[in-house]
Image (cartoon, rainbow, N blue to C red):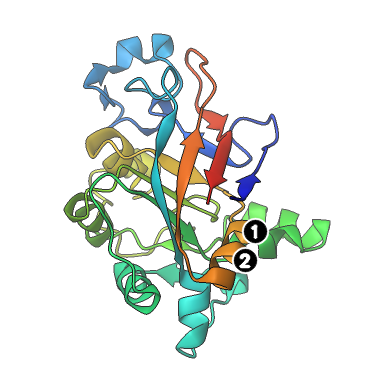
Amino acid sequence: MRVTRWISSALLASAFLWVAAAPAGAADQLYWGNEGAESISHASLAGGGGAEIPITGRAVLLDIEESRADTGRPLDHGRGEVLEVSDLDACLHSQGVTLRRGDIALVHTGWAHWYLQLPDEERIALRDRRLATGFAQRLDLPRWLWEHRIAAFATDTFAVERLPVIPDSAFADTAVDDAGMMHQELIAKLGIPLGELWNLHELAIAARADRRWDSFLVAKPLHLTGGVGSPANATAVR
């Protein structure tokens, strides 16, 4: 049995983390658990009890970096690739994996590893441009997560979704204050915990070596009242 562990920085919203309910309310009115805006400053970090009880379960690595490269369409993180649900489906097919109800989906694109290899000035420039690979702001993603009964969704990208937001975002009218991003749709409305900036590089290497894509994941967010994010404190056992 091998254990792979990552420990994040203490900067709560700028490193390997879970995103809390607090910054992703539905139109700044309702938050995870149907809480009103007036109570959010007293809410626990992860909402819905996630800070008190660790997030545990079967995790499945979806190695989009490998599946895209194998089909002759390698990801170009320098231009901020737009990912689609079709990439998830193609990856599952190529890996021969079937998702189960309650699975935790871990999406490996290689973005975090690529970003960490860049010189400091290039990383700063990308950050200032808010340019990052991620999923298109379409209804397809929340629908895919619902239909597969995914319990949590984490990626190695900056924000899970593509930055900047695609011009024809399906959430332009419902997330006006969030520039059409779908965080509020996924977290506040669908109730899906989102993991951002997860360094899945070593896990992907291990999975590619033996072609086994599942693991047992344990993640314990920090319990901070009014927090907006937490180091993931995640361990994958495989």
Kindly identify the amino acid type of the residue bearing the numbered disc 1.
Glu
| Image: 182 above or below 229 | below
Residue at x-position 54% and y-position 65%? 207
Mark 2 in CB contact with mark 1 (< 8 angstroms): yes
In the rendered image, which residue does mark 2 sit on?
205
**Which mark, by number, is residue 13?**
none
Q: Residue furthest front?
A: 1
- What amino acid is found at the position of numbered circle 2 in the picture? Ile
How many other residues sit within 10 Å of disc 1, few (<14), some (14-19) or many (≥20)?
A: few
Residue 73 shows up from this direction: no
Question: Hey, which residue is sitting farthest bottom in the picture?
Answer: 72
Quadrant in the rendering for residue 129: bottom right
Q: Is residue 77 left or right of residue 23?
A: right
Task: Classify 10 Å Cα crowding around label 2: few (below 14), some (14-19), many (20 and above).
Answer: few
Q: Is residue 92 above or below residue 7?
A: below
Secondary structure beneath dot 1 equals: helix
Q: Which residue is mark 1?
A: 202
